[in-house]
Amino acid sequence: MAKTFMPEFRTHGELLDAQLEGLKWTVKHACRGSSVYRKKLDEAGVRPEDIHSLDDIQKLPFTTSGDLQEGYPFPLLSVPFEDVVRIHASSGTTGKRKVLCYTQKDIEDWAHFFARCYEMAELTSEDRVQIAVGYGVWTAGVGFQLGCERFGAMAIPAGPGNMDMQCEFLIDFQTTAMCCTASMGLLMAEEVNKRGIRNKINLKKMIFGSERSSEAMRKRIGDLLGLEHMFDIPGMTELYGPGTGLDCIYHAGIHYWADYYILEILDPETLKPVPEGETGEMVVTTLKKEAVPLIRYRTRDLTRLISGECACGSVLPRHDQLLGRSDDMIIFRAVNIYPGQVDHVLSGIKGIGSEYQVILDRKDDGKDYMTIRIERAIDGDKAQDGELKKKIAGEIKKQILVSGDIELVDYSSLPRSERKSKRVFDNRD
């Protein structure tokens, strides 16, 4: 029998038992090892021995990115320094970077469940995996490589950018799977098409991380490259890094590794659980993490749980694609808008490409104005612009309840990126 990285349990009940055991361990470990957690638990009036069921998680205090930034450079550390074998850090877009410490067991656990991602994507040891994400203090490249090597496939640590090298590797190494951002995936697909090398490569699958990918973007990439599958891989530095889940070949939601963390979906305002199937903020509690355990960590990411059993038969639960972040929400004329909603609307309209920009301005009259700049499809006809603009504006109004000016531009005229594409430009004060 082939080696598997899937959990040993086979029933939902066994999963819940494993989660309760892990929750008890985490609370006890964090209380014993971290003065910050000990103070938080004391203020909440909770002791480790008070955890008797999974429902007791609601007694526990929340942890936020502020706790990580305030404790810089080694926040929430719950083991002695001599047990720390590595650090990683977030990209630090606002304020100090969030630095996370890892024990050797943390690294081993991360490698194990990342290997599970490749298994769920149905790769084999015969696959050749081109890793076109960033290497450095952040968790991306090293995480993808760690998991690939643990899984047993060939890792090609290419890093992002450098189209000449990427295309050369695709041809010379006959890469079968590529790991990158969706934006990099589109860039690669267009480059392969432009160079006329599709019949020289053997690429079958792509695994996208770091940003949300719209259906339109995925369809465009798949059509250009003739891919069998494209997968979404979630992850964040605070929760080990990328690799904390993957959608299976049925692409009916992202299976998340519930044996390594508990996922709550809460209303970001009330911090109470939302009804099953409704969108809320992802709040995570780790079950095995040693150096920096997380107790009810508010990720700010928005998604929903997907109920029922997946066609693949996995006992591991699922959540939907990320809608966006609660702190990325746009307030436009008193309407709350998430970038993922714009993705969703535009993906359902024929005649346009996958790339767009949302530009917000405040004019001299004191009112806010929205312009949505969208690429035409590659074979788009400018003569159809009027009708297409009307359709797009109508769908935006119908589904998001706002009005905006629609501007159509030539295919490939909006910028491409090998990392994340910036799509919202808020020029208001």
Image (cartoon, helix red, strand yellow):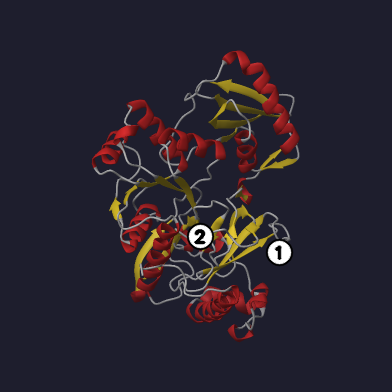
Q: How would you rate the neighbour count of disc 1 (Cα within 10 Å): few for under 14, some for 14-19, many for 20 or more?
A: some
Q: Position of residue 383 (x, y in %)?
A: 60, 13
Disc on the earlier residue, 2 or 1: 2
Residue neighbourhood size for the residue with mark 2, other residues' Cα within 10 Å, grouped as few (<14), some (14–19), many (≥20) = some
Question: Element under label 2?
Answer: helix
* Residue 11 rendering spot, x and y as whole percentages: 57, 74
Do we see residue 73 in this rendering? Answer: no
Q: Residue at x 51, y 62 (%)?
A: 68
Cα–Cα span, label 2 and label 1: 26 Å
Which residue: 62% across, 53% down?
302
When the figure is inspected, residue 60 is found, relative to residue 124, above or below; the finding is below
Percent x, y for residue 416? 44, 32
Q: Return the residue nearer the eye: 329 or 344.
A: 344
Whether pointer 2 and pointer 1 mark residues with C-beta atoms closer than 8 Å, the reply is no
Outermost residue toward the bottom? Answer: 49
Mark 2: which amino acid?
Answer: Gln
Res. 6 image quadrant: bottom left
Disc 1 designates what residue?
273
| Residue at figure coordinates x 51%, y 49% from the top left | 94
Check the image and name the residue furthest to the left: 172
Considering depth in this image, is 66 or 49 the residue closer to the camera? Answer: 49
Is residue 167 rendered to the left or right of residue 287?
A: left
In the picture of the structure, the residue carrying the numbered disc 2 is 69
Q: Is residue 44 above or below residue 276?
A: below
Classify the position of the C terminus by image quarter: top right
